[in-house]
Image (spheres, rainbow, N blue to C red):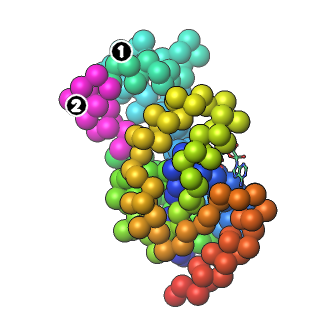
Amino acid sequence: MRLIGLTGGIGSGKTTVARMLGDRGFHVIDADAIARDIVAPGSPALQELSEIFGSGILLPDGSLNRGELAARAFIDKEHTELLNSITHPRIHEETQKRIAAAPGDVVYDMPLLVDNDLHHDMDLVIVVDVDPETRVKRLAGRGIGEEDARRRIAAQIPDEVRRAAADIIIDNNGAPEDLIPQVEAAVAKINELP
Ligand code: ADP
């Protein structure tokens, strides 16, 4: 089993590339989905969070009100660390579990792979790269306003730092079909790995 890290800034087309790799037989593990799943209604993590941050972080249907949790947790370092101490170990454990259970080569789709210094644990790192201005335009198509998009891009590590961590850079500045030969080349390179 080979572990391939897939990352890129918000709006770079990571999800698009992950889907293409999934179509080519890779088992895709979505880091964002894990972060959501561990705080699903009825989960121990959500129970703990509501005990610490108050039941006001829950919506009437028992699911997490993310905005409210953020408002209560991201007020200072201490509260942020408290939140992380509940979520991070569970995210880590669930990620390891899914990797171990994967039937074959894994593509770990992780927006913050380089930001969180996890790229060293990968057998190969793919970075999807797009000029920030193009990302702002594409994110508008996903309903994310320009100001919000710029703020989110600025909150992530600089593109050049992410690119420097890549074994393969997929350039998604062009049309979606331009991704196909690049994904095929990436698959060929992965298949050359021991
Ligand atoms: P990410 O997962 O990195 O945030 P997505 O794969 O969701 O990015 O892509 C962001 C948006 O840009 C989506 O709406 C997607 O359909 C669109 N998109 C991706 N690649 C291209 C492309 N080459 N040309 C035009 N739009 C694209």
Image quarter of the N terminus: bottom right
**Could you tell me residue 8's position as x and y percent?**
52, 55
Magenta-drawn stretch contains 87: yes
Residue at 40% from the left image edge and 33% from the top image edge: 45
Residue 101 sits in quarter: bottom right
**Left/right of residue 63 with respect to residue 116 in the rendered view:** right
- The relative height of residue 5 versus residue 33 in the rendered view (above or below) is below
- Of residue 186 and residue 61, the one placed in the foreground of this image is 186
Q: Amino acid at mark 2?
A: Lys
Q: Which residue is mark 2?
A: 77
Q: Which residue is mark 1?
A: 54
**Quick one: which residue is furthest to the right in this view?**
177
Residue at 65% from the left image edge and 59% from the top image edge: 172
| Other-residue count near label 1 (Cα within 10 Å), few / some / many at <14 / 14–19 / ≥20 | few
Separation of marks 2 and 1 at Cα, in angstroms: 18 Å
**Numbered disc in front, either 2 or 1:** 2
Q: Main secondary structure of the magenta part?
A: helix
**Could you tell me residue 133's position as x and y percent?**
58, 45
